Image (cartoon, grey):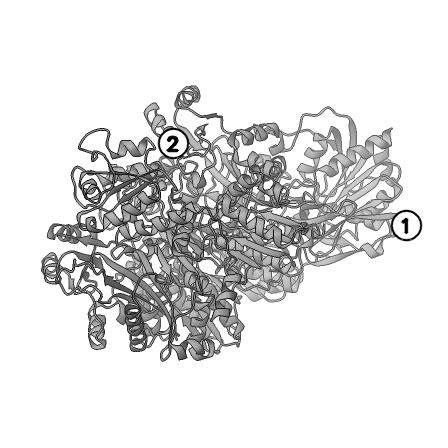
Amino acid sequence: MPKRTDISKILILGSGPIIIGQSAEFDYSGTQACKALKAEGFEVVLANSNPATIMTDPESADRTYIEPLTREYLEEIIRIEREMAPGAGFALLPTVGGQTALNLAIELSDGGVLEKYDVKLIGANVDAIKKAEDRLYFKDAMQKTGLDVPRSALVNNLKDGLEFAGKIGFPVIIRPSFTLGGSGGGIAYNREELLEVLARGLDFSPVHEALIEESVLGWKEYELEVMRDLKDNVIIICSIENFDPMGVHTGDSITVAPAQTLSDREYQAMRDAAIAVIREIGVETGGSNIQFGVHPSSGRMVVIEMNPRVSRSSALASKATGFPIAKIAAKLAVGYSLDEITNDITRKTPACFEPTLDYVVVKIPKWQFEKFPGADEGLGPQMKSVGEVMAIGRTFKEALMKGVRALDTGKRIGGQKIEPKILTQRLVTPHPERLAYLQYALRQGHTVKQLAKMTSIDPWFLYQMKEINDMQMELEKHPMDSIPTEVLRDVKRMGFSDGRLAHAWRLNGKGAQEKVRHTRKKHGVLPVYKRVDTCAAEFESYTPYLYSTYEEEDEATPTQKKKVIILGSGPNRIGQGIEFDYCCCHASFALREDGYEMIMVNCNPETVSTDYDTSDRLYFEPLTLEDVFAICEHEASGGAPVGVIVQFGGQTPLNLSLPLKAAGINVIGTSPESIDLAEDRKRFGKLLEELDIPQAPGAMAASIEEAVAGANRVGYPVLVRPSYVLGGRAMVIAYDEETVVRYMKEAVEYSQDRPVLIDHFLENAIEIDVDALSDGEDVVIGGIMQHIEEAGIHSGDSSCVLPAVDIPEALLNRMREYTFKLARALKVVGLMNVQFAIPRGNGNSKGNGSESGKVYVLEVNPRASRTVPYVSKATGVPLAKIAARLMTGRKLREFLPEYIDRQADLATGNFFYVKSPVFPWNKFPGVDTVLGPEMKSTGEVMGVADNFGEAFAKAQTAAGQKLPTKGTVFISVRDHDKPQVADVARKFVEMGFKLVATAGTADVLEDAGMTVERVYKVKEGRPNVVDLIKGERIALIINTPHGVDPFFDEKAIRRAAVAGRVPTITALAAARAAAEGIAALQRGEVNVYALQKLHAETALQH
Amino acid sequence: MQAILALEDGKVFRGKGYGAKGECRGEVVFNTSITGYQEIFTDPSYAGQIVVLTNPEIGNYGTNPEDNEATRPYIEGLIVREFSKVSSNWRSQQVAEEYLEGFQIPVLAEIDTRALVRHLRDNGVMRGVISTLETNAEKLIAKARSFPKMDGTDLAKVVTTKHTYVWETGERSHLPDEVVGVKETPERFHVVAYDFGIKQNILKKLRGEGCKVTVVPAETTAEDVLALKSNGVFLSNGPGDPEPCTYAVDNIRRLMGRQPIFGICLGHQLTGIALGGKTYKLKFGHHGGNHPVKQLHTGKVEITAHNHNFAVDPDSLPQSEVELTHIDLNDNTLEGLRHRNLPLFTVQYHPEASPGPHDSHYLFKDFVKMMEEWKG
């Protein structure tokens, strides 16, 4: 069936900000869809609120709307697009933007918007989406086709839930309807737990409904990735087996492709079932993911669920097989059939086939519970991981070991003895470190049988782990100098890292891995690179998508072309997310254009950088020194010059820059020494002094005593943190000695080499981020971003606005001057990010050297920062692309001569661009939502408007924090905010809001002549503020943290706010912005702007 | 235990030996199926061949009596990357290594199977010897060059049943019908199945469609078949080169038009020759479970199981009599044909799957329909 001719314009919906359960995989799928449909000649329109994506690059679509993903804004986009082409065939593709896009499509359809503007839904129809998403419809459909499902009932109240659970017996699973990543779901082992989990689940469900289901805990879990075309051809792209049995969300499970423990009969029965499911649900074209549970001793197979869209698992399946699911899905949606599409990898066989693997793929999730103290670390049906790594090996053992080292946790378990009781608990209860405890248990002599009983993990997987353990024991018998070649080879073939070998041989310090490497070379034990080719080598492959292994034949002979290797950022983490993947991709695109052979190294399957066509070569490898060095050495063996870029992938590759350079690798761009200098507190402080740039007084400490003395010297409050951090891991603001002592005792590890840093904390200061480009001589500032929240809240967690809104020109100039000086002093070649703080001018300077109106440097990062994509989207100048070119020796003057001559920042025209963060609070019930120096947000959105207020309101809306236009505002501020609170409150009163406040704040407001309803603090009496929030009386909360107030209990307020979805503002500056935003909302305007148009206007003005 | 594979072109792979100690020889072919190693071991079409499996993890789910395609393995030897020492599956009764050892089948493991597959892909299938006894590669290479090539060898005669018998459903399994593939169906037709190396699942599928099946030896004459007064004749899969099987070609010619005929694999090739066509050897054959085959009259694609080194040259067939019904989309190999006037159709691939996808089960129904029409 050829391409549809009744459509000429297609609106693609993105998935919005990165959140737990909906991550960078939808940038991968959206980008593929945009590219594929554009190549087919369609006019592609894209809507996504997330600026940190490749898909929102102006080149990806014909018109890109970085706008809130809500019905109102989408309707406006559709209206405008329809107006532009009244008679054109207009379609909406909702299947590449995750659950968000599907839900929106349903909303637009149910609301009559699609009908009104004559927009056709392609990829999946409304009936199919509803059938797949609504558990009751789904169950009916499955039973109709004769497929087995767990027994279940849909309930909308607690009583029915209890009754049904009584019938089927505990434990039961609770799954709220229409939520993302299993939000609000859980397992209940008894009545009491059921009441708690069900109540939460009903609350989370937008339709107040949840499924109570027969427990299939401990069953084997499988997934099949299925594709179907309009001719009803159905193919299975990949089978995935979960290492962790049923009960753990598949996003939190270690998963393996292909399935390892199914015979052909069982696999084919599952395949038949999957095909029956996709047909019955009626997904006409595209990809779906279908999950199955299999009883381990009877083989009973049940269908668990289906996603009628491209999903996280399809991203994994695409990377695991080389089959580009999203791209093909997009083509199927516009009418092609699978046999009409060619397999890019073989170039001559069609896409209508089922990939076969001659390797094993292991995915391991990445969790960050350390960011959320108090969160329940148990893993269950609600996803909690923030990212994942994928590893490819020729065996499961090799892939597992590669995955473990790719995870970059830096943790080791089993150093000390673990109590048997604790060990049992750690094995039985799924949690992030279970794999390490399994290794420990095997070493302690636990048998596979015992472990299988405790964990319900398939004995085959456990036996593989036992073989790894046996190999470890064997390795420990042989000292480095006398290890037989055969043993060394077997060890490496099993995936043991050089680091592990060094550990076994008790080699410590910097040269340890090098010694192992030399030993390996002496024995001739070196990796080769094999291809991922969809066909197990049956056909020749034309795409060098590579992984390392220890075998005979190498399939990655280096070319004679000059080449640049880009090190990616590894698994998504808080503080190291999609923004860095964006930069890596851009560097690759730009230098490819310049004629370099581009080589990408990364291990994150959710990314655009790991698409086989982003670079000329893709090494799907862990980002460790061993693996990266081996690739560099291999590529250099061709004789052509090789440069390595470390500054685009965040901290992971940055940590490798010095060791790589020491090993003789040509790191291009800003030198590793400069990167190191900027991170070295002492040397950097000296440099600032030389340059006459102020910074907050600081000290370093490697003991409690030093810390206390240092804090006293620099003056409280102090910001305490370990050296070398990204995303502010383990930072704290201390107002007293007690906090400093506690921090030193509990929070961090430190040493003489890695001391703790103590800085005077600039309170009530404006924080500013500056991104700049430099070739070592010329410097151009990309953007001066003013944070909405005060300094002290991690820059990744602050909203910010471009251009700055209320900073005097003189101070802007001073920041420019400092940036220029720093770029030249550090000989920055590429990107640089500087964070400044300017204490506000109302007299609370503490006499510790901080003065209002003075510009302090907080931090300098001579690398790509998190804000690079945002600044690029706002200015229309692709910073990362230019930076990459500077690193290859080109000059800034070639690209931005007029900005150099005029010493001007990149322009943003007449528009304001606000970036706002998105937080995962709803995944971690009970965790305090207060913001601080440690980053907690998982993603970001951008709002654009011709005035600051509207831009801020749009960003807040896009972030899911919808500002109210009427109602009651609860205000409670700490003492030093009280002088300014009246002005802010008055704005709300003027807009028609009522005020509620606790005593202290109420006094101030009444003194200023406003009417305030007084409310008790949480522990003063009832009804208190929490009661009001729970009673849905509060529309907006303005609460700046009081610190320790025994009566106030801010945590309870914040918890109630999250549960009640009441927007909460924790900084006065943000409250001011919100007031402007609300004013804009009250005007009732819904304005949307295509990025391409904004950029054209900006360029014109310029 | 060390083990060596020596190929006739001088290439040698050294790895570890599993299963039986000893030596084996055969044409080395690779199979890209992810699942179904046990069915591959026991498929008589692999007689005379050493099989390399591209899936690197083999043996994981053990073996069980239900999944055998014959009473014993027919592969000469097995080559894998990783051979599991344990099995894990609720149906497993024996670890794969023990199973093969019981039948004296040598296994070469822990070699770079991908390199071997690429070598075979680029240079074509070739003769090879696996030995766990001999360490001198030169001697083994000489051996690999000394035994007869597959081309021109009639192996159907070797693997076929010695006696005619009526097939009975084996033990019932607790698994649902669609898993085991046998349905309790009343016998409506009588089919005579030529055994050129027939797989159990073909018999199960025929039985499942309501056919009583009488299995006859490869060299049974057309007259003897007609004397059984069946409703249709089935021509099975089997090993080796079709060309030397002239007896079978003669019999098919004599049965054409007198009985509805359905053929699979070798049965398809023999029919092609009987219709006046020619067969040729593919460079490295089709062995796997992921081949897209297009039904030419509907345009639909089925994902199919393949196991053939030879194919019928479509240009050699008389167009006036023969309609081409199926082609492989990977390389346009002819995968199915139908006689324009007589009740006869054959496919090159394996609609009975086992191992492989079930997309083509409809062909058994087509056969039954053809018999129904013929009967009526």
- Are there few (<14), some (14-19), or many (20+) residues within 10 Å of tag 2? many
Observer able to see residue A889: no
Foreground residue among B215 and A76: A76
Three-letter amino acid code of the residue under disc 2: Ile
Instruction: Check disc 1 and report the residue beneath it.
Output: B320
Q: Position of residue A754 (x, y in %)?
A: 21, 63
The vertical placement of A597 against A138, above or below, is: below
Q: Is residue A776 left or right of residue A733?
A: right
Circles 1 and 2: CB atoms closer than 8 Å? no
Observer able to see residue A719: yes
Labelled disc at residue A891: none
Q: Position of residue A1011 (x, y in %)?
A: 25, 38
Q: Which quadrant holds the C terminus of chain B?
A: top right
Circle 1 chain: B
Residue at image x 57%, y 34%?
A131
The vertical placement of A211 against B87, above or below, is: above
The label nearer to you, 1 versus 2, is 2
| Residue farthest to the front, as pictured | A1009
Instruction: Check disc 2 and report the residue beneath it.
Output: A187
Q: Is residue A355 left or right of residue B314?
A: left
* Callout 1 secondary element: loop
The count of marks equals 2
* Callout 2 secondary element: strand
Foreground residue among B19 and A98: A98
Q: Is residue B72 left or right of residue A480?
A: right
Foreground residue among A685 and A798: A798
Three-letter amino acid code of the residue under disc 1: Ser
The CA distance from mark 1 to mark 2 is: 67 Å
Residue A781, by quadrant, is bottom left
Circle 2 chain: A
